[in-house]
Image: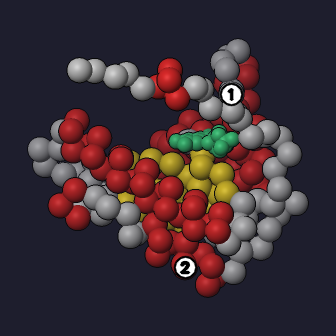
């Protein structure tokens, strides 16, 4: 079941996203909000990719869940890195810092959506069709993730437990 998301809520979610911190205030994120037509074209691209991978006996992982969520969601937002494909002297450290900032931006949006009881899904499966999606939208920048807002209750995924904190913390002298 999908869930409508009002333009006011979506604006507040995006405003929370762009409050994220970034080194030297680079604000490396930008968004493409997909209308109905592009959402459906992107779904077609992902479904074609899924068929190709299945034919090649490749692991399609969570692609079926991701495509279903995109189908059901009321808003598909693509998140891009505006620097990585064009900034002179771009390097691995800059990329790490930009991606961390974009992750913070996405998490800000997800937490704001959660507070508004808007269901979301962070989708990196969209990257399986990165080249095709960029060609469709005429973008030369690096696609980092997709986020779906307003997908309603998702029964497919149970809340998953976390590993013991002790296994995640190394103490040193
Ligand atoms: C970077 C990142 C990428 C993700 N990509 C996908 C995806 O492509 N498809 C999907 O179904 N879920 C994706 N997820 C969502 C997770 O599978 C999971 O639903 C989310 O972390 C919340 O569930 P949890 O709190 O039970 O772990 C992604 C999460 C993160 C942080």
Q: Residue furthest top?
A: 57
**Looking at mark 1, is its residue's CB closer than 8 Å to ligand 1?**
yes
Q: In the image, ligand 1 is in what quadrant?
A: top right
Q: Secondary structure beneath disc 1? A: loop
145, 161: nearer the viewer: 161
Which mark, residue 11?
2
The residue lying at 11 percent from left, 44 percent from top is 89
Q: Measured from the top left, where is residue 54 in percent x and y? A: 73, 22
Separation of disc 1 and disc 2 at Cα?
32 Å
Q: Nearer the viewer, residue 106 or 54?
A: 106
Horizontally, is 105 left or right of 96 in the view?
A: right
* Residue 39 appears in the picture as rendered: no
Q: Determine which of the numbered discs, if any, sits on residue 61 in the image.
A: 1
* Quadrant position of the N terminus in the picture: bottom right
Q: Is residue 153 above or below residue 156?
A: below
Which quadrant holds residue 39? Answer: bottom right
Residue 158 in sight: yes
Q: Residues within 10 Å of mark 2 (few under 14, many from 20)?
A: few
Name the residue nearer the viewer: 129 or 83: 83
Element marked by disc 2? helix
């Amino acid at each position: 079941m999908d869930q409508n998301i009002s333009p006011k809520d979506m604006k507040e979610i995006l405003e929370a996203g762009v409050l994220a911190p970034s080194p030297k205030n680079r604000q490396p994120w930008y968004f493409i909000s997909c209308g109905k037509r592009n959402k459906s074209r992107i779904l077609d691209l992902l479904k074609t990719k899924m068929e190709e991978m299945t034919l090649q006996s490749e692991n399609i992982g969570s692609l079926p869940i991701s495509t279903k969520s995109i189908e059901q969601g009321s808003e598909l937002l693509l998140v891009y890195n505006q620097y990585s494909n064009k900034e002179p002297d771009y390097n691995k450290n800059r990329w790490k810092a930009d991606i961390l900032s974009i992750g913070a931006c996405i998490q800000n949006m997800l937490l704001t959506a959660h507070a508004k009881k808007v269901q979301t899904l962070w989708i990196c499966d969209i990257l399986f069709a990165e080249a095709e999606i960029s060609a469709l939208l005429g973008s030369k920048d690096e696609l980092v993730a997709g986020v779906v807002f307003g997908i309603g209750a998702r029964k497919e995924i149970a809340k998953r437990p976390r590993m013991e904190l002790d296994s995640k913390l190394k103490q040193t002298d």
